[in-house]
Amino acid sequence: MTLLLHDKLEEQSIYLPTVARIAAIRDLTAMEKLYTIQLPDGYSLNNRPGQFVEVAVFGVGEAPISISSSPSRSNGSFEMCVRRAGDLTGVLHQKKVGDTIGIRGPFGRGFPIERFRGKDLLFAPGGLGIAPLRSLINEIRDDRCNYGRVTILSGARTPGDLLYKDELAEWDARDDVDLRLTVDHGDDTWKGNVGVITTLFPDLQVYARNTIAVVIGPPVMYRYVLMELLGKGIPEGNIWFSLERRMKCGVGKCGHCQMENIYSCQSGPAFPYSEIKHIEEAI
Amino acid sequence: MGFRIMSKTAFPDWVDGLCRRYRVVGPKPVHGQYVFDDIESAEELDLGYSQTVLPPKKYILPPRETIFRFDGASVEAVVANSDRWTVALGVHTCDMHAIHLLDRVHEHGYQDQHYQARRENTVLVSIECLKPCTPFSFCKDMGTLSITEGYDLHLTDLGEDYAMDIGSEKGEALLEGFAFIHEPTDEDYRRVNQVMTEKWPNFAYRLEFDTTELPSLLTVSMKDDAYWDELGERCLACGMCTNVCPTCYCFNMVDEVDFSLEAGDRIRQWDSCQIDEFALVAGGHNFRGPRSARQRHRFLRKGKYQWEAYGLIGCVGCGRCAQACLVHITPVDTFNALYHRHRQGHVEEVR
């Protein structure tokens, strides 16, 4: 009888990143940069909007970062918006064009855009939430005729914290996108609304049963925006969140992103409210 | 595949033979406690051991292991196993049930090749427990006091002999070429039957309710904030309970660099949901900040979430966490207290 010893991994390790190249870096604000990442051999990420990648900075570690570019504009590379918030992102911010990083993914299920077709879409990003939502917004913009009304309610702390200002201006200039901005604290140049994102809701008119709402922002934001959306009669199954946790491994093993019996990295991070309303630890 | 009989006088020769061919690990006494450690000869082995400090899980999911090496812009996965089988001798059945759960977790969804490489190179020789090992164990309640599958070989102590149940081709391979083993006679069947019949009354039930009700008990106890707050007040958040647990598998990944600052290793190491940073994210939000929330997570994960996600209860009743806890937080006390509180309507009050 011959029994084999396993002296090598039968397939590539799920924890082994692909080495990728930083193709471009653009400053968005004092705290956030937009990175264009080129995968080797023209390999495409093939992501869905709402998915994320694990970004490795060798010698520092690995962290989950949302994908900010839409699959419709991939061109063999993808974009991610990174706020300088910790050790890994601090080192990442010092990287130059041409430097290499590790990429694993994409992970998570993403948003089911095929189910959004023909619906009115209401996007409510808060702060850095615009980074993953930009992927979905641009995907829909590039296929605009297949969707109903598109409304974007976007909030930031100050005018200087607004991300993707040029794209916001571009969306604002279009007739088929209704963009409404607010900041928590205005400054001398700011002419728009001042207040948290929920202050944009009283003037908003929606056809509730045909509206899909997608909300991504800081943890504190969800329950307040949820109340506004439910208050307008938008069905629970039509309200989508991205519940980001410490998604350390991305493959449902390490336990850090667990919300009761589900792993956010695998079952989410995109969830309809109807799926997680019974999960105490969700929002 | 049935069982064979090996006399205890021949047993040391068999173990010594294994030591020459494989890496053999088993229970041995160290400073008044037992640990699973490398065995060079049968003399070191003590199969009458009570319980090891750490479960044999550590051979499949080590406290620290290198996942890959990086050097500048190149990365290379590290093979997760040695050049020969690791034979784990004398694994208690609770720890076998724990490995069964770990197997299910690591083959679910994405397969963890590092776990699987180690697992496939590990040969499990379990042993039937005939007396309680510590005052903290409650294996009878958790249904882990015996085992029907998953072992490569399974030993039952018949006094002067061992009954050796062959569970796999690997187990069969361990016996290959060893002459002092024979097919069971009618008398051997009688002895095995007697031992297996007499063992059960030696163990006590310690939970005051049927264990199949545990997931639903924990569901209704989720909002018993008063109880979880009390546990949180006592808990030191030291992480000992999860360190010694045979079913805990949460991990962190860290990079360690050499002097060049260019090359280094990515290390997987055990992590604990009881540590305050476990659910902390960049920006400073902690999704499970209070110790009460972390203790609640631990008990619900063991008794409810794992059952919902994988169809198996995440606690095997070994009692190691109870023994390790400095402030006497135990699963038996916790589950029984929740049961009584539910019956007395505490949960309804807090709603």
Image: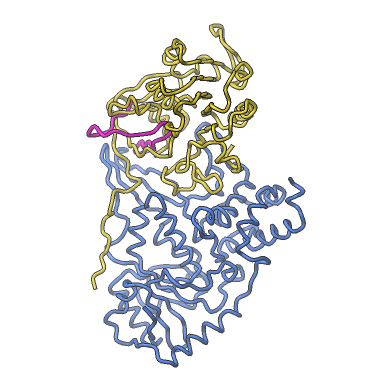
Chain colours: A yellow, B blue
- The residue depicted at 65 percent of the width and 49 percent of the height is B222
Quadrant of the frame with the N terminus of chain B: bottom left
Q: Decide which of B26, B333 is in the foreground and name it.
A: B333
Whether the magenta-drawn stretch holds residue A37 is answered as: yes
Task: Measuring from the top left, give residue B62's x and y in whole percent.
Answer: 41, 57
From the top left corner, tell me how far across and down residue B105 is, in percent.
Answer: 44, 55
Relative to A89, is B264 above or below?
Answer: below
Relative to B216, A78 lies left or right:
left
At horizontal 51% and vertical 56% (from top left) the residue drawn is B243
In-front residue for pair B277/A79: A79
Instruction: From the viewer's perspective, tell me whether residue A270 is left or right of residue A230.
Output: left
x, y (%) of residue A55? 37, 36
Quarter of the picture containing the C terminus of chain B is top right
How many numbered discs sit on the rendered protein? 0
In the foreground, B204 or B105 = B105
Q: Which residues are magenta?
A: A36-59
Above/below status of A257 relative to B22: above
Residue A274 % position (x, y): 57, 38
| Closer-to-camera residue (B136/A243) | A243
Find residue A57 and report its image quarter.
top left
Residue positioned 28% across, 37% down in the render: A19
User: Residue lying farthest bottom?
Assistant: B187
Q: In the picture, residue A27 is in which quadrant?
A: top left
Which of the 4 quarters of the picture holds residue A115?
top left
Q: Is residue A38 magenta?
A: yes
Q: Residue at x 38, y 49 (%)?
A: B110
Residue B275's place in the image compared with A216, above or below, is below
Q: Position of B232 compared to A123: left or right?
A: right
